[in-house]
Image: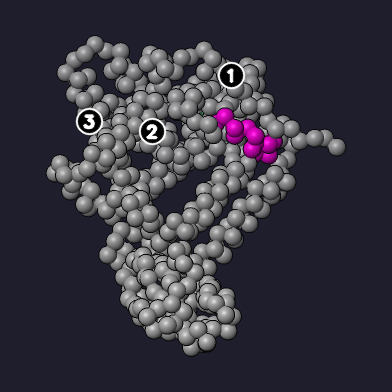
Amino acid sequence: MKQSQPPQIKVQTIDVGEVDRFNPRHRIYVRKTDGVWSQLRRRMGWVMMLLFLVMPWRRWDDRQAVLFDLGKRQFHLFELTIWPQDLILVALLFVMAAFGLFFITTFLGRVWCGYMCPQSVWTFIFIWFEEQIEGARNKRIALDKAPWSFNKLWRKSAKHSAWVAVALLTSLTFLSYFNDAPQLYQDFFTGNASFTVYFWGLFFTAATYGNAGWMREIMCLHMCPYARFQSVMFDRDTYIVGYNRERGETRGPRGRKQDPKQLGLGDCIDCNLCVQVCPTGIDIRNGLQYECINCGACIDACDEVMTKMNYSKGLISYTTERNLEGGSSKVVRPKLLGYGGALAVILISFLVLLTQLSPLQLDILRDRNSLFRYNDAEQLENVYTLKLINKTQQPQTLQLTLEGLPGHQWLGEQQIQLAPAELLSLPISIAIAPEQIPKSIVDVRFVVTNLDSGAKISEPSRFFGEK
Ligand code: SF4
Ligand code: SF4
C-alpha cells in the first residue's frame, strides 16, 4: 500500500533567501484585492476588532462582564467567576485552544494565520489606513520614491498619526480587560493612572505600532514559532492555497483573443498580480511555502484575471496536495480523527468541570498549636478556621452546622452573610463534655446550607479528645 507522505514545505524560498526583509528598500507594497476571500477576511477582521473593542464596556450586574482581576486573582466571564482554585478550567481552555488549532491546521492549513491571527488582522487594518491616506499600491511606491514635499509630509504624518491612534486604542482596550474600563480611560487621560498602567499602555502602543505598521510579515516569517512547526500537522489532504501548475504552465503574456494552445501556453498570463497582493510577498507559483498564511488574496487576484481573460476560475485555489497530483482527497483520516477526538475529550471534561463548579467553597483548617484543650466549662474543645468563598455575584445567607458529634456545642457565629465574591475566614470552636465523646478521634463533617436556595456543601474533618 502506498504510504501517505506529508507535503514538502520549502523552508528556503526565493523571497527569504534572496530578499532581506529587514531592509526598508525591500518593503512589500500590498495591492488591494476585492474577491470573495478578501471580503470574508476583511469582514471577519472587522467583527473581531469590534468584539475586542466593545467587550470591556459590557457590564454585568455592577461590574465588567469580562474582567481578569489580577489583584484579586479572580477572572470574571459574565456570570462565571473563576478563582485560583478553579485554574484547572483555564488550563483546559488553553489545551483546548491548542488542540483546536492543531485540528483546524490539519484540516484547513494556516487559515488561523490568514483570517484570525491578531498580527494579520491588525496588519490589514494598518494597510487599510495606508491605502486611504497614501492611495493604491502604485501611488504608494511613487510617494516613497518621491523627494520630500508638502504632499508627502502631510500624507506620511496623517498615516502615522492614524497608526498611533489605532495602536493606543488597541493598547487601552487590551488593558481594559485587566482594569475597570471607564476608570482606566479617565485615569489615563487625566494623568491619574499608576506607573504600571502608563508603562504597559505605552509598551503595547509601541508594540502594536511597530508590529502592524513596520514589522508586518517579518513577524510571521522570522518570529512566529507556529509557522515553523505547522508542517508537522500538514498532510497531503490538508487544504492549502495551491497553483495548478499543469493548467498554468507554460506561463506567458498573450492577447485576450489569442488561443493559448496555439501559442504553446498554459492559462497563467504571468501578470504577477498574485505576487503583488500577497501580504508576505511570495510567489505561490513556486509551490507550497512556509511563508504562505492561507489568506486567499492570490486566489481572488487570479480569479479576477481569469474572468477578464474568459478562462475558468481556480488556477490558484484552496486545494490539497493530493488533488493537485490528480488524486481525490479524504476528509476523514486518522490524524484528523486523533486531533478531533482529543479535542472532544477535553471539551467534555471542561463542560463536566464547569457544571460541577460550586457557587460556594468551604475549606477547614484545624488549629495547628494543639489537638484539643479544656475550656473554662471543663469541656473538650477543638479550634477550627472555616474559609468560605462566595463564588457568585449575589450575597448568600448561610447556616453552619456540624454532623457526626452528638451533644456538641458550637462556639462562634453559626449564621453568616457573605457578600458577592467575598472570602471569609471564620474562627470557631466545637466543644463537648468529655464523657459524651465516643472515642479519642471522631470523624465529623461541617455542613454549610444556603438559607435562600437550600443548597448544601460539606467538608470532612476530625474532632480530637481523650478517652
Ligand atoms: S495572477 Fe494568475 S495569471 Fe497572473 S501571474 Fe498569478 S497565477 Fe498567473
Ligand atoms: S501566497 Fe496567496 S494565500 Fe499565501 S500568503 Fe500569499 S496571497 Fe496569501
Circle 3 residues within 10 Å: few <14, some 14–19, many ≥20: few
User: Image point 41% across, 28% down: which residue?
Assistant: 216
**Residue 125 in magenta stretch:** no
Of the pair 119 and 293, the residue shown nearer to us: 119
Is tag 1's residue or tag 3's residue first in the polypeptide sequence?
1
Q: Write the residue at 38% across / 13% down.
A: 25
Q: Is residue 232 magenta?
A: yes
Mark 1 neighbour density, 10 Å: few (under 14) some (14–19) many (20 or more):
few
| Numbered tag placed on residue 12 in the rendering | 1
Eyeballing the image, is 407 above or below 289?
Answer: below
| N-terminal-most mark, 2 or 3 | 2
Q: Which mark is residue 411?
A: none
Find the magenta span and give its range: 227-238
Observer-nearest residue: 30 or 228? Answer: 228
Q: Residue furthest right?
A: 1
Report helix, strand or loop for mark 3: helix
135 to the left or right of 438:
left
Q: Which residue is mark 3?
A: 161
From this viewpoint, is residue 286 visible? yes
